[in-house]
Image (cartoon, rainbow, N blue to C red):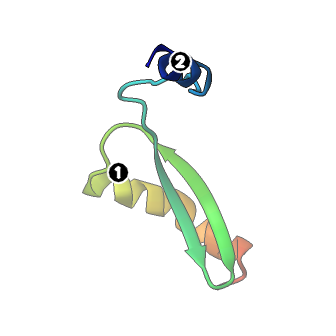
Amino acid sequence: MKLLFITSLFSTIPTVKHGDGSIRLWVCFSAAGTGSLVGVEGKLNGAKSRGILNENLFSSSQDLRLG
């Protein structure tokens, strides 16, 4: 039984875990490709979503030659 315990110590891989580490991203994509990738701080509500669209959607559509 002790031999099994010793070998299990050498066969495990230590990991580092971080709590509450998350990011939110908004991305524009279509069949033509991907557009802007925008980091979002905090919660994404309607007003913030409209702001991201106003700032990034037109430039992404031009980059992808959609309009």
Residue 15 in sight in this render: no
Local crowd at mark 2 within 10 Å, few (<14), some, or many (≥20)? few
**Residues at circles 2 and 1 in contact by the CB criterion of under 8 Å:** no
The secondary structure type at the circle numbered 1 is helix
From the top left corner, tell me how far across and down residue 12 is, in percent.
56, 26
Instruction: Please tell me whether residue 12 is drawn above or below residue 60 in the rendered image.
Output: above
In the displayed structure image, the side of residue 44 where residue 67 appears, left or right: right
Say which of 1 and 31 sits in front: 1
Local crowd at mark 1 within 10 Å, few (<14), some, or many (≥20)? some
In the displayed structure image, the side of residue 43 where residue 40 appears, left or right: right
Amino acid, disc 2: Leu
Residue 22 in sight in this render: yes
From the top left corner, tell me how far across and down residue 57 is, in percent.
54, 67
Residue beneath the point at 63% across and 75% down: 61
List the residue tagged with mark 2. 3
Instruction: Please tell me whether residue 36 is drawn above or below residue 34 in the rendered image.
Output: above
Instruction: Please tell me whether residue 22 is drawn above or below residue 49 in the rendered image.
Output: above
Q: Quadrant of the N terminus?
A: top left
Say which of 51 and 4 sits in front: 4
Q: Quadrant of the C terminus?
A: bottom right
List the residue tagged with mark 1. 48
Residue beneath the point at 69% across and 76% down: 33
Res 31 quadrant in image: bottom right
Residue beneath the point at 64% across and 66% down: 35
* Number of numbered labels in the structure image: 2
Amino acid, disc 1: Lys
Dot placed on the residue nearer the N-terminal end, 2 or 1: 2
- Give how far apart the Cα atoms at labels 2 and 1 are: 58 Å
Residue beneath the point at 32% across and 49% down: 44
Say which of 22 and 44 sits in front: 22
